[in-house]
Image (tube, grey):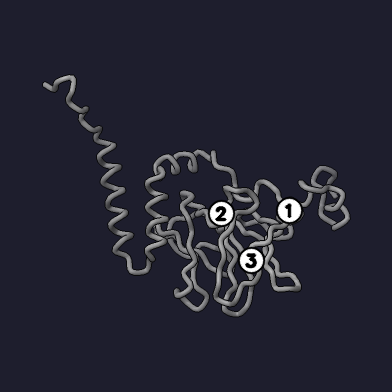
Amino acid sequence: MTSPTDPPEPDGAEDRHRAEQAALRERISADPLTTRRDYLRIVTTVSGGLVVGSTVVSAGVLHRHGDGSAPPLKVADRLERGQAVSFDYPGEDDRAMAIRLPDGTLVGYSTVCTHLACGVLWRRDHGPEGDLYCPCHEGKFDSRTGVVTAGPPPRPLPKVIVVEDGQGAVWAIGTARSGEDEQAGLCRGLRQRNPALADAAGCPNRKSGR
């Protein structure tokens, strides 16, 4: 029999959860493809409540990346080939990344995995164009298209539409949900911010059927 001052015995489910976290940390830290910075980021994600996150994602509670709208955001003065930059767009909780692929193509994506909302990283040294990688559950996405190439993610990464101005600066100007056409995403955001400008740009008006 325990005394009133004895600590309560840990619950079996809690023990299992702690053991799973420890095992995941050990596996990630031993992975030579994961940098120290990436490891710290992953541990933070896990320690921040992966179990809670999986519950709200499966319940559809988390908003989709890009559901809000925002004016254009300058994300880099210049982005050279083989470089990437992280930023938040359109909201402060919408983690995103712009990548200049080796052939000069500019692409942008949400870096919130479509599986359980872990952080997605770009691994430049994987393949000719690199890959987008979620280390929590080994999810992989194509760097050029955002489509799933391996692991459990059920959908492509939502796109963040990025463009380059005349001075070489990179701007985020809109978003497209997972599987949504970029033009449809741009028009959706523009209609939320300025319906008259959306009409002038020829964007369809779902309410009127045009």
Q: Is residue 166 above or below residue 161?
A: below
Which residue sits at x=30%, y=42%?
A: 17
Q: Is residue 69 above or below residue 103?
A: above
Q: CA distance from mark 2 to mark 3?
A: 15 Å
Number of the label disc, if any, that sits on residue 95: 2
Q: Secondary structure at mark 3?
A: strand
Q: Exactly how many numbered labels are in the figure?
A: 3
User: In the rendered image, which residue does mark 1 sit on?
Assistant: 71
**Sequence order check, earlier mark of 1 and 2:** 1
Q: Secondary structure at mark 2?
A: strand
Which residue sits at x=50%, y=78%?
A: 128
Q: Quick one: label 3, few (<14), some, or many (20+) residues within 10 Å?
A: some
Residues under numbered marks 1 and 2 in contact, where contact means CB atoms less than 8 Å apart: no
* Kind of residue at disc 2: Arg
Q: Position of residue 167 (x, y in %)?
A: 73, 73
Residue 15 figure quarter: top left
Camera-side residue of 86 and 207: 86
Q: Quick one: label 1, few (<14), some, or many (20+) residues within 10 Å?
A: few
Q: Position of residue 72 (x, y in %)?
A: 72, 57
Q: Is residue 118 left or right of residue 209?
A: left
Q: Is residue 10 left or right of residue 35?
A: left
User: In the rendered image, which residue does mark 3 sit on?
Assistant: 76
Which residue sits at x=38%, y=56%?
A: 40
Residues under numbered marks 2 and 3 in contact, where contact means CB atoms less than 8 Å apart: no
**Sequence order check, earlier mark of 2 and 3:** 3
Instruction: For marks 2 and 3, give the one nearer the viewer.
Output: 3
